[in-house]
Image (spheres, rainbow, N blue to C red):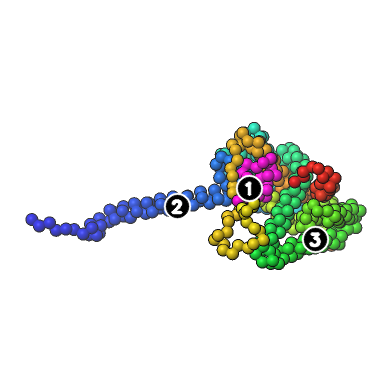
Amino acid sequence: FFFRPVRPSAILLSHPLLTQRIIDTMGAYISLGLTYCACASASSLCNACLGSTAPGTTGRKRSALLLSAAVAVSLFFQYSLAPSIVNKTGWWKVYSSIPGMGKRVYAAWLDGCDGYADTPDLLRQCVQNTGVYRPTAVAALFYSVMAVASGTRPSLNREAWPAKYGTYFLLVLASVFLYNGPLFDGIFLFVARFGAMAFIIIQQVILIDMAYNWNESWVEKADECDRLDWGSGKPWLRLIVASCAALYGCAFAGIGLLYHYFSGCPENNAVITLTLIGIAAVTAVQLSGTEGSLLTSAVLSTYAVYLAYSTVSKNPSAVCNPQLGNSDPWGIAIGLGLTAISLAWTGFSWTAEGRLNREGVQTTRSVSPNGPQRQDTDGLNLNTPFIDPESAPTTGHVVEGGDDLDTSASGRELWKLNVVLALISCWMACMLTGWGSIQGVVGQDDGEEHHTAANPTVSRVNMAMVGVSQWCALVLYAWTLVAPRLFPDRNFS
């Protein structure tokens, strides 16, 4: 007649299956909660890093990230997959284990490289080049289609990015099974050379824009320091001068190294000398007026020396080119660095929005008391420092969303973004493959290796194309300095 209470712990101990079920249920709820937190954090991180897809945005960051992935795939194909196919090791074993796939891939990647079968070094380089053409050709095609699509409906550039990424990687996978000719080492290589020439000039615009921003940022920091304490801004101005000196030092040191290692042939001497003359000319023009800045000229001078090195390093004569047939890690590293700068500018720079669009889909306005939005003249006295930081007026920039992309004038200019990315794809294809030239070791004599260019005509054409691009960049920069003087009534800002 008396009820004896049973403790819950006793029930659990007497029913181990029930205990295990409760533990599994609790673990499932905890895992679900952690998964939700992880997904929410990942979503917030992606939106912060890659931008939003809300109306008024452009999808620039996602476009730049896709091209970064294309660069990574190109390097993987060139330095991992292609050598394994030639040597039938590593990744080749994975493909060859699939019935019918091994022979197909091997025949596709060696298509057009059969003439170098007796020279393993040239054969490997030929296959490596075709490995680079695949992802870069797909990227160039992708951005060309996106340029047409965004020209007709600009909002397509910010929509359906998971499908776009999936489509790109599926096309890259399909390209593995396609033969080299005539699509990759014929049509695309021909188009890529001209696209790379155009990008060299666009890259100069990018470098000029970044140099102007760099110079203005440090000058503004110097002014801000001087407002608080007169003379405290001098270190920033000294840093600008030191940066100019360092860049010019690198440029002239590069000229000296080019004379030391690549002189001895008329064409090389002409390229190096004309580069030196061009640097001196644009610097003199810039110093003779108020346009531009010395830091911008220093950046362009260093870039011109890099282009001169790219030109002479493609000389097919072993007498004139000590690097003939050898790998060029410094050239590739500099090229990848310039590509990273271009991608960062295209995807993340505010000034790129204004360069690529007429007005910019997203605009910034100053909230400084003396900014253009303030009409009264009793605002902040810039000569009086802020005594109390908490009472200081708010300054900075406010992001304002633009109109709908499909109806705004700025949205109709969004196709330029994809054109620039398509040209970067062409530049990557040429930079990683030496503009399609094939150079390597063809034999040894008394222990000394003999290097040659398997396609010397192509190498000389590449020299001419890079050289012309270099002078187009220098002339364009000189014109930006001279034009305001020749036409003072026109606005060149």
Q: Nearer the viewer, residue 236 or 464?
A: 236
Mark 2 burial class by Cα count in 10 Å: few <14, some 14-19, many 20+: few
Give above or below for 338 relative to 136. below
Which label sits on residue 239?
none
Residue 64: x percent and y percent?
Answer: 64, 47
Q: Residue furthest right?
A: 266
Q: Is residue 183 magenta?
A: no
- At numbered mark 3, what does the secondary structure look like: helix, strand or loop? helix
Mark closer to the chain start, 2 or 3? 2
Q: Nearer the viewer, residue 173 or 412?
A: 412
Instruction: Name which residue lies at 71% across and 48% down.
Output: 428
Q: Are marks 2 and 1 in contact (CB under 8 Å)?
A: no
Picture quadrant where residue 391 is located: bottom right
Q: Nearer the viewer, residue 141 or 52?
A: 52
Which label sits on residue 375?
1
Quadrant of the rendering where the N terminus is positioned: bottom left
- At numbered mark 2, what does the secondary structure look like: helix, strand or loop? helix
Which label sits on residue 37?
2
**Label 1 sits on what residue type?**
Gln
Residue 73: x percent and y percent?
Answer: 64, 48
Q: Which residues are magenta?
A: 345-367
Residue 214: x percent and y percent?
Answer: 70, 56
Residue with the mark numbered 3: 248
Mark 3 burial class by Cα count in 10 Å: few <14, some 14-19, many 20+: many
Visible residue check, residue 192: yes
Give above or below for 244 relative to 468. below
Q: Is residue 353 magenta?
A: yes
